[in-house]
Image (cartoon, rainbow, N blue to C red):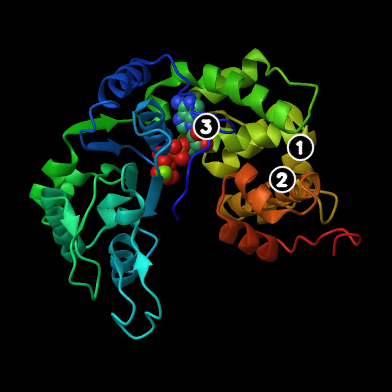
Amino acid sequence: MGQCMDSRNANYELVGVSQNIRRIRELIGRVAETGFNVIVCGETGVGKELVVSNLYQRSNRLGQPFIKVNCAALPDALLESEMFGYERGAFTGAIRTRRGKFEQANGGVLFLDEIGDMSLPLQSKLLHVLQGGDFTPLGSEKPIQTDVWVITATNRDLEQDVERGRFRNDLYYRLSTIRISVAPLRTRPEDVPLLIDYYIKKYAQQFNETHASVLSPEALAKMVAYPWPGNVRELQNVLQRIIVLGEGEETLDGMLMAAAISPAAAHGPARGGGSSSLMRMLAADGGAVDLSDLALKKIRKKATNQVERELISFVLIKTGWNRSKASRILNVSYKTLLQKIEELAIVPPPELA
Ligand SMILES: Nc1ncnc2c1ncn2[C@@H]1O[C@H](COP(=O)(O)OP(=O)(O)OP(=O)(O)O)[C@@H](O)[C@H]1O
Ligand SMILES: [Mg+2]
């Protein structure tokens, strides 16, 4: 779960011209050197982690550890030992002493992702650490002093959670000296063309595609109007499909519909619907589209599966079935990729099997 960032290989550019993104860039510049506690809020896929990376990149802690903990990924007891560590023999199974993430992050940044999912008892413990700067690993008697810059992120409405007693008021105030709120992409459509441009170039380069496709004005307009419930991550996925599957725009409606109901779909069938790849897919079994079998939910699932199967197969082949590399390109966890491979019955070519 911890990671050290390598600024040579990664890309941290926060693309956008909207008021929201400009303001965030300015805030990052002002806050990065201060070490004030920062909380980054926003819907899934808006770029919270990217903002956190930018804070670290611009801070004087760059080069020191950057440790990330996903508070939603572990049950309470495990999260506690992950964060604070334990002494050998502290509990059955603690066969050796383990340093917690707080200790590992000393001198650097501790990024607590999905902080809104932390339990109340653990919130108290965290508050205590933040107040005193020291903590005691499980089963130890020696408090450890650390100097960490705590940055948090959440997609929950923490103020509401505070009101409802689900999140500690005092902890919330401690963590949110500076609050950076990343707006959903649908509220800043002016950023969509820039993001498209940026990621088309990036993926074309990544996949060695020379035909860095330029979208037609019509396709661009559809994408600007689309509400992007999965925000920038969803936009990335759609662009990857366009670039790597090389299928071009006739699949756009299908892709947007696969993710949600696209505005285009709501305004009537896709142009030339009879020959679109969606229609081909629906007709795949018998030749003609069976009108009695067009439940939207079912089709959506079918379309998603088809697109996912093609995309994942393509990336696996491009990476020589290197699944950890493929999972990074696809921006899903390794575990999710393995599940998908199994679910979608994707098999390696004989020479790699
Ligand atoms: N303004 C932006 N410019 C360029 N890339 C962006 C921008 N915003 C988000 N991205 C990219 O979109 C992807 C999703 O962003 P990120 O992981 O930071 O979202 P998140 O808010 O942490 O999502 P989640 O809530 O699901 O954890 C990342 O690959 C990120 O680099
Ligand atoms: Mg995130």
> Which amino acid, by three-letter code, is at mark 1?
Leu
Residue under circle 3? 7
Q: Is residue 303 visible?
A: no
Q: In this view, does 275 lie above or below 343?
A: above
Residue 21 position, x and y percent, is: 37, 20
At 70% across and 17% down in the image, what residue appears? 214
Residue ranking furthest to the right: 351
How many marks on residues? 3
**Left or right of 6 in this view: 90:** left
**Label 2 to label 3: alpha-carbon separation:** 28 Å
Nearest to the observer: residue 36 or residue 148: 148
Label 1 SS: helix
Residue under circle 1? 245
> Which amino acid, by three-letter code, is at mark 3?
Ser
Check if mark 1's residue and mark 2's residue have beta carbons within 8 Å: yes
Q: Is residue 228 above or below residue 328?
A: above
**Label 1 to label 2: alpha-carbon separation:** 7 Å
Label 3 SS: loop
Q: Which of marks 2 and 3 is nearer the N terminus?
A: 3
Residue 293 position, x and y percent, is: 67, 56
Badge 3, how many Cα within 10 Å: few under 14, some, many 20+? few
